Image (tube, grey):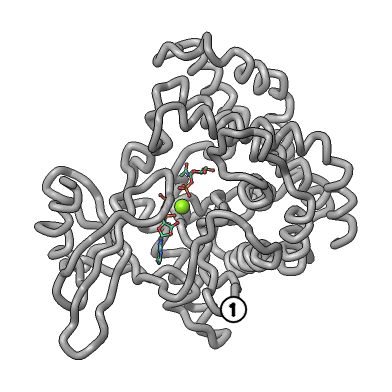
Amino acid sequence: MKMLEMIKNEIVNAFLFDGDFIYAEPFGCGHINATYAVYFRRETKPPVRYILQAVNTAIFTDPQGLMENILGVTSHLRKKILEQGGDAQRETLTLIPTRNGNLLYEDSEGGFWRSYHFIENATCHQSVDRPVLFTNAAKAFGHFQKLLADYPADTLHETIAGFHNTVDRYALFEKAVAEDKAGRAASVEKEVRFFLDRKADGAVVVDAIAKGQLPLRVTHNDTKLNNIMMDNDTDEGICVIDLDTVMPGSVLYDFGDSIRFGASTADEDERDLSLVSMDLELFEAYTAGFLSEAGSSLTAEEIRLLPFSAKLLTLECGMRFLTDYLNGDTYFRIHREHQNLDRCRTQMKLVADMEYKMEDMHKIVAKYV
Ligand code: ADP
Ligand code: GN1
Ligand code: MG
């Protein structure tokens, strides 16, 4: 409530919005930033809404650097989309500046805000109800990667250090177990053991990158299905959003994270684990779409590791949820008690299912290379 008051009384006046403010409401299902839709009435034109976000500065400690990344990446994408005759306001994020010409507004309490043009007639799906939707998401993420292939990676700020460094993630996890800040470690011994048993997996991609066996590319790093807008009429993936984690990374992070979220048969926080599995039909739908866009630029080693990456990113995410649960839920936004533990358990179920289906996943990848 307090936040909505602040938006109304202070924040909306700071941005170059068109029209008179009507109201603001919390929007979307992101776990990190606080996102709102803000609505404006205009005299001669239809009403308009914008996305307004409070950047989570506990996580993104350099909001200026973060915005430089987003401006750089969206400008690069905009240029290419226009060259190809596309609609840049629909196919990439468009920042709304503040009245002072900045991309961030610092409020009276030290919070940082940014705004985007609202992409209308499009949906962020929370799950895949038709496989074609997932194929289309894959094409769009693959295309995004292609458009950024010539982006100067050394100009990007590392917005979260070691974001997908699973060796570092293991260290943070073990520290959380040892510190046991929220007094929960004794209640999750089975879960802790599950991740410790798979510690060797955590080093595979990190080591291969260090040895030069896997290339670094400009990747999105947070490719869940609800980070892409899909056209309501055509079901096509039109705009990749949530660009906070665009950084040099492995293509395996983007492929693996998409499978982790979108190929699951249940919600990320489903409590009935009997509903949770990795759907091979959805794995195939994504693989087909992704390889049709990005396949020709991948190395043999990247292709070989695609099925493993699904397991790796699920393992990593499950471990991150458990780490946060052990630390007292300070990172991922929760809406109920133990939600991070529930999220961790779905990821464990998925990892186990992926281990069981690894051979099938390899066969599917082989069909599309
Ligand atoms: P978080 O980092 O918290 O996940 P996101 O940037 O992904 O934040 O935004 C949260 C949600 O807000 C998205 O899942 C989507 O539903 C909605 N959203 C974000 N940007 C736009 C936009 N430009 N147009 C329409 N909806 C958007
Ligand atoms: C977060 O921001 P959002 O909700 O799209 C997280 C991802 C996790 C995901 C799990 C910056 O993504 O890394 O995979 O939750 N983003 C950040 O659902 O940590
Ligand atoms: Mg998001």
- What percent of the width, then of the height, locates residue 280? 79, 50
Is residue 141 placed above or below 250 in the rendered structure? below
Answer with left or right where residue 203 lies relative to residue 355.
left
Residue at (17, 63) in percent of width and height: 12
Query: Viewer-proximal residue, 72 or 114?
Result: 114
Query: Viewer-proximal residue, 250 or 329?
Result: 329
Is residue 346 placed above or below 307 in the rendered structure? above
Answer with left or right where residue 158 lies relative to residue 16.
right
Q: Quadrant location of the C terminus?
A: bottom right
Is residue 246 placed above or below 100 in the rendered structure? above
- What percent of the width, then of the height, locates residue 80? 54, 78
Q: Which residue ends up furthest to the bottom in the rendered image?
A: 44
Residue at (66, 46) in percent of width and height: 264
Q: Amino acid at mark 1?
A: Thr
Q: Name the quadrant where ligand 1 sits.
A: bottom left
SS at mark 1? Answer: loop
- What percent of the width, then of the height, locates residue 22? 17, 69
Residue 198 visible in this rendered orientation of the protein: yes
Residue 150 visible in this rendered orientation of the protein: no
- What percent of the width, then of the height, locates residue 258? 63, 52
Q: Which residue is mark 1?
A: 234
Is residue 28 placed above or below 92 in the rendered structure? above
